[in-house]
Amino acid sequence: MSALRALGRAGLSFFERLGRGHIFLLYTLGGLPATLYRWRLLTSQVFALGVLSLVIIAVSGLFVGMVLGLQGYNTLVDFGAEESLGILLALSLVRELGPVVSALLFAGRAGSALTAEIGLMKTTEQLAAMEMMAVDPLHRVVAPRLLAGILAMPLLAAIFSAVGVYGGYFVGVGLLGVDEGAFWSQMQSAVDFHDDILNGVIKSFVFGIAVTWIAVFEGYDTAPTSAGISRATTRTVVNSSLAVLGLDFVLTALMFD
Amino acid sequence: MMHSKWIETIVGAFVALGLGALLVLTLRISNLSLAGFGADSTYEIRAMFDNIGGLKVRSPVKMAGVTVGRVNAIEFDSKSYTAVAIIQIDKQYTQIPTDTGANVYTAGLLGEQYISLAPGGSEEFLKGGDVITDTQSAVVFEQVIGQFLYGKAAESGGDKDSKE
Amino acid sequence: MQNNNQELEPLVRIRDLCFRRGERVIFDHINLSMPRGKITAIMGPSGCGKTTLLRMIGGQLKPLSGSVRVDGQEVTALSRGALMSLRQRMGMLFQSGALLTDLPVFDNVAFPLREHTRLPERMVRDLVLMKLEAVGLRGARDLMPSQLSGGMARRVALARAIALDPMIILYDEPFTGQDPISMGVLLRLIEQMNEALGTTSVIVSHDVREAASISDYIYVLSGGKIIGEGTPVQLDVSDSEWVRQFMDARPDGPVRFHYPARDIAEDLLAGGDE
Ligand SMILES: Nc1ncnc2c1ncn2[C@@H]1O[C@H](COP(=O)(O)OP(=O)(O)OP(=O)(O)O)[C@@H](O)[C@H]1O
Ligand SMILES: [Mg+2]
C-alpha cells in the first residue's frame, strides 16, 4: 500500500516537474528576441558552450572515425567489399554517431557546466538579486544560454562527423590501402544530401534543444545547497543522455522508415 | 573590452568551422557532389521501359561502367502503359548518339539496379528533352525462374523484350 | 487630489501580514508603515524574519494573508510586468551582497544602468565612478567580487543598489563587517541620500546605536509580533521590558535568544534515542 503511494507520489512529482519545465521554457522563449538584439550575451555563451567543447568533440570524432575504419575494414575485407568502407563510415557517422555521440559529449562537457553555473547563481542569490533589479533572469541568464546551446550543437555534430570521416579515410585509405577513388565515389553515390545529411543536422538540432533545455532547467530548479547543485548536475547528465537516446530512436523511426 | 573582441573573433571562427564542416559533408561526402549545384550542369532525357523492376530515383545511369547521370524521377505513362524514367545527364557528356539504347541492369546478383546506356552509331546526339525508346526492361527474377520452370527460357532468350 | 492622497499614504504600508515557514509562524498579523522620505529601521533578534519582510516588500515572497502596498500598489496582486517596473524604482541591498560573481566591480554597479537605461557608455562610466566613490571603492573598480573582502563586497552591493537613484532602498544589514570609519561613511551616505534626493530608506540592522542615530522611526520585531515601535527617543525611554532588553543588549529578558527548542537538560539527557 505504501509502495503504491510512493509510486503515485513519484509519478505526480515527475509530471509536476515536467509541467514546470515547460512553463520555464515558455518564459525563456519570451526572452529570445531580446537576446538576438544583444548578441554580445550570445557570443560569450557560444564561446563557453561551443568553442570550449570543440577539442573534446574533434578528438572524439577523430578516434571514432579511425576505429570505425579499422573495424569496418576487417569485416568488409572478408567479403571483398572493402571499397564500401566509405559508405559504412559516412552513413554511420552522419546518420547516428555524429549527432548522438556529440550530443552525449556535449551533455557531459557543456550541459553539466551550465547546470552548475546557474545552480550556483541561484544558491548565491545572484538570480534573486537580478529579479530585485527588475531584470528577468530567465531572459538575461537563461535565454542566451539556451540559444547558444541550440546553435552550437549542430555545428559540433557536423565537425564530429567530418573529422570522423577523415579519420576513417586516414586508416582505411592511408594505412590499409583501400582504393581512394572507390572510397569516395562509393560514399558519394550512397550518401544522400537530403535523407542523410539534412536528417543528421535535424537530429543534432533536436538534441541541442533537449540537452540545453534540461541543463538550464535543472540549474534553475536546483535546491540552493551544495548537495543540491551536485544532484542537479548529475541529473542533467543522466536525463539528457537518456533524452538523446530516446529521441534518437523516435527520430530515426520517423526519418528512415 | 579588448577581451570581448577576442571572444567574438573566436566565436566567428568557430561558426565558420562548423559551417565549413557542414559544407564538407555536403560537397565531399553526399551525392550533391555528383549532382553539382542544380539543373545548370545537367540536361534531361527520358527513357520508356515496359518494366523498370527495382529501379529507384537516384539510381545511377552508366555508360561503359562510368556514371554519367542519375534517375531524377520515375513516372507512369497511362496511355502506353509504360514507365518513364526521367534522367539527368551531366553536361560534360554531350555526345550521346540519338539511337542509344537503355537497359536496366543489376549490379551483381542482388545489388542495386541501374540504367546502362549502349551507344548507337548515329551522327546526331541527344539533347535535353529527347526520348530513348530502344530500351530493354529489367530482369524480374520471378519471371526468369518461372520461364525456366516451364521450359521456355531457352526459346525466348531469357526475357520478353520490349518493343524495338 | 491624487497627489494629496499620495502624500498622506506612506510609501510602504503593511496591514495584517501573516506568514509561515512550515509550522513556524514568522509574522502574526503585523502592521507597519514606512513614510515617504523617512528612514525606518527594523530591528529584532536574528531569525525573527527581517529579511523575509524585505523580500515581501520587494514582491519576492508572497504572504499567507494580509496586504503589502508600495507606492499605492498592492504588491501581491501585481502582474509580472507591473512588478518589474515597480522594482526598477526599488533598490535592495542583499544580506549576502549577491554580487554577480563573473562580472568585475565596475560592471556590477553598471548592471542596472545598462539594463534599464539607454545611456551612452561615457555617462554610465561617470555615474558608476560616482557611486563607487561614495562608498570609497573607486579604486577597486577592476577587481572581481571574489577578490573583495566581505565588507568591501557589501559596499559594492550598496553602490549597485543606489545606482538608479531609486525612490526606496531596502538595506539588509548594511553595516555588518564595516570598520568604524566606513560605518560612519555609510551612515552619512544613507542620511545624505535621504536629505538630498528624498529617498525613503528601510534599514535592517543589529547595530542599535548607529541605526537609531539616523532613523526617524524604529520597529522592533520578535516572535512574529511587533514588540515595540516609536522614534529613537521614544524607544530610548520606553519602559517595555522587551524593548529594554533589545536596546540595552541584555542576554536575559522576555526575548528568547534561542531558536525554539525543548529544555536543554531534557535534550542532553535524551541522548541519541529519538
Ligand atoms: N527557505 C526557507 N525555508 C524555511 N525556513 C526559512 C527559509 N528562509 C528562512 N527561514 C526561516 O525564516 C525565519 C526568518 O528568516 P530571516 O532570514 O527573515 O531572518 P532574519 O530576521 O533576517 O535573521 P538575521 O538577522 O539573522 O538575518 C528563520 O527562522 C528561518 O529559519
Ligand atoms: Mg536576515
Image (spheres, grey):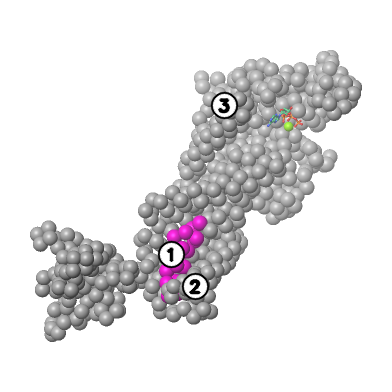
Q: How far apart are marks 1 and 2 (CA)?
A: 15 Å
Circle 3 chain: C
- Circle 1 or circle 2, nearest the eye: 2
Q: Residue at x 72, y 37 (%)?
A: C95
For the C terminus of chain C, give its image quadrant.
Answer: top right
Q: Can residue A43 be seen in this view?
A: no
Question: Which portion, as a residue range, is magenta?
Answer: A82-100
Whether C206 is among the magenta residues is: no
- Residue named by callout 1: A91
Secondary structure of the residue carrying numbered label 1: helix
Whether A83 is among the magenta residues is: yes
Circle 1 chain: A
Secondary structure of the residue carrying numbered label 3: helix
- Residue named by callout 3: C75
Residue A73 - label: 2
- Circle 1 or circle 3, nearest the eye: 1
Crowding near pointer 3: few (<14 within 10 Å), some, many (20+)?
many
Disc 3 with disc 2 on a shared chain: no
Along the viewing direction, whichever of C181 and B14 lies nearer the viewer: B14
Circle 2 chain: A
Q: Which amino acid does label 2 sit on?
A: Tyr
Q: Residue at x 79, y 37 (%)?
A: C176
Along the viewing direction, whichever of C131 and A114 lies nearer the viewer: A114
